[in-house]
Amino acid sequence: MYNCRFINHTVTAKSDIREGTTESRQAKRGLLVLCSAAFLVPFMGSALNLALPDIGREFSMNAVMLTWMATAYIISTAIFQIPFARVADIVGRRKIFMSGVLIFAVTTVACAFAPNGHVLIGLRFLSGIGSAMMFGTNIAILTSLFPPERRGYALGINAAVVYAALAAGPFVGGMLTHYFGWHYIFVFPAALGLVVFGLSHFFLKGEWTEARGQKFDLVGSLLYGVGLGTLIYGFTSLPHVRGFIFLGTGLVCLMLFGRFELRHSSPVFNLRLFTGNRVFTLSSVAALINYAATSAIAFILSLYLQYVRGLDPSHAGLVLISQALVQSCFSLVAGRLSTRFDPSRMATAGMAIIVAGLIGLIFLSTTTPYWMIISILVLLGVGFGIFSSPNTNVIMGSVDRKDYSAASAATGTMRLTGQAISMGIAGMAISFHVGTRNITSALFPEFMQSLRTTFIIFAVLCIAGVYASTARVTRRG
C-alpha cells in the first residue's frame, strides 16, 4: 500500500495494485507524465547550445553575454525551486507541477519572438520559474508513486529519459538551427510542453499534500531567494568587483536564512536534513560538485566545434550526441542495479570515471581528431550514467516520506546551483582570456586557453567530488 496523503481520497491497495504485481497503473501513468516533463528542460538546454553562435550573430551578443542565456534560466529555477516545493506540499504537488509545465510552455514559445538579446534573456528567466515548479515536485511525486524496492528502477528510467533528451537536443537542435533557424529551438519544446500538460490532466491522478493547512514561510523564502540569487550572480560576475560584492551579500543572506529557518516552526526548507543526516548531506554535496564540474562542457564544446573547428550546427550536434546516448543507456542500467548493489559506491565509481574524461578534455587542440573527441565524450557519458540515478536514489532513500518534496527540491537546487557555478567558471575563463570581444579566428589561441583553464578547474572540482562521495560510502558502512 502507498502511504501518500491525498486531498479527498487515499490510494488503497485494492484500487490499482494487485498482490504480488509490480507497479500500479497509476504509477506507470504517472511515470509517463513525469518522464515526458523531464525530457523538456534538458532537451531545451542541449538544443540551445547549438543555436548560440547564430543567436550571438543576430543579436550581436559576445561569448560572455551568451552564457547568460543559460545562467538567467538557472538562477530563476534555483531561487524558486525550494519555495515552490513548499507551496506544493501545502496546496498540492500536482497543481504546482501542472502550472509549471504551462508557464514553461508559454514563456518558451515567447522566446522565439524575442526582438533582442536582453528580452530573450529575460524570457529565459521567466521560463526558469515554470521549470522550478516542475522540478521542485517531479522527483517527489515519482518517489511517492513507487515503493522503495522499485524506486531505483523508476529513477533510472527518469534519468535515462533526461539523457535521451540531452542526446536528442544536439542533433535535433542542430538540424532545426541549420535548416529552419534558431527560433524553432523554442517552438518545439513549447509544443511538447502543451502535450505534457494535457497528459498531466488525464494521467496524473491524486494530489499529494504533506503539509496541508500549514503556513507558508514568506520571510524565509525571500531570504533564500535573495541569498542564492545574489550568490550565483556574484560568482558569474567574477573577477569584477561587483562579483565579490554580490558574493558577500549572498553569503550574509544565506547565513541569516539558516538562522531563521532553524527557529521557524514551519520553515520553507527543513535544514535539519543537512545538519542531522550525513548521507543526505554528502550525497547532495557530491551532486553539487558533479554538476559544477560538468554542466558547461556542452557549452564550451559547442563553441569549440563551431568556431574553432568550423562545423555547422548539425554536424557539431552529431559529435555532441555521443555523450548523451551513452549516458542514457548507462543510467537505465545503473538505476536497476542501484536496487541490488550499494548505490553510493556506484555513484563514486561514476564520479571517478568523469575525472578521467575531464583530464582528456584538457588536452584538446585545434587539430584533435574527431574520433578522440567522441571517445572522451563516451567516457564522460559512462561516468554520468553510473553517477546520476544511484546518487539520486541515495538522496531520496535517506529521508522520510514527509521530506520528499524538500529532498527533491534540494536535489534540484544542487543541480541548478552547480550548473550556475559551472557556467560561471566557463564565463570567467572566457572573460579572462578573451574578454568581451566576439570570437574570431584571431582569438582562437585565447579561446583555446580559456577552454583548457575551464577543464582544469572542472577536473580539480570533480576530484573533490570523488572525495565527498567516498566519505559518504565510508560513513554508510
Image (cartoon, helix red, strand yellow):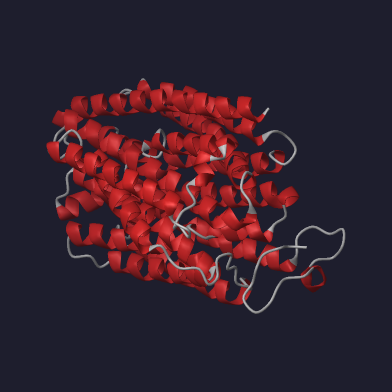
* Residue 368 seen in render: no
Q: Is residue 455 left or right of residue 56?
A: right
In depth, the one of 195 and 126 nearer the eye is 126
What residue is rendered at 59% in x and 61% in y?
141
Q: Quadrant of the C terminus?
A: top right
Q: Position of residue 353 (x, y in %)?
A: 53, 26
Please say whether residue 16 is visible from this viewpoint.
yes
Q: Position of residue 387 (x, y in %)?
A: 56, 36
Q: Nearer the viewer, residue 162 or 342?
A: 342
Question: Residue 246's spot in the image, x, y percent?
Answer: 21, 43
- Direction from residue 24 to residue 219 in the image, left or right: left
Residue at the far right: name it: 20
Quadrant housing the N terminus: bottom right
Viewed as shown, does residue 372 lie left or right of 107?
right
Residue lying furthest bottom: 8
Residue 312 placement: quadrant: top left
- Residue 288, how many percent across, how many down? 44, 38
State the residue at coordinates (50%, 40%): 275
Up the image or down, 472 lies above or below 93; here it is above
The mark tally for this picture is: 0
Query: Vertical placement of 360 versus 148: above or below?
Result: above
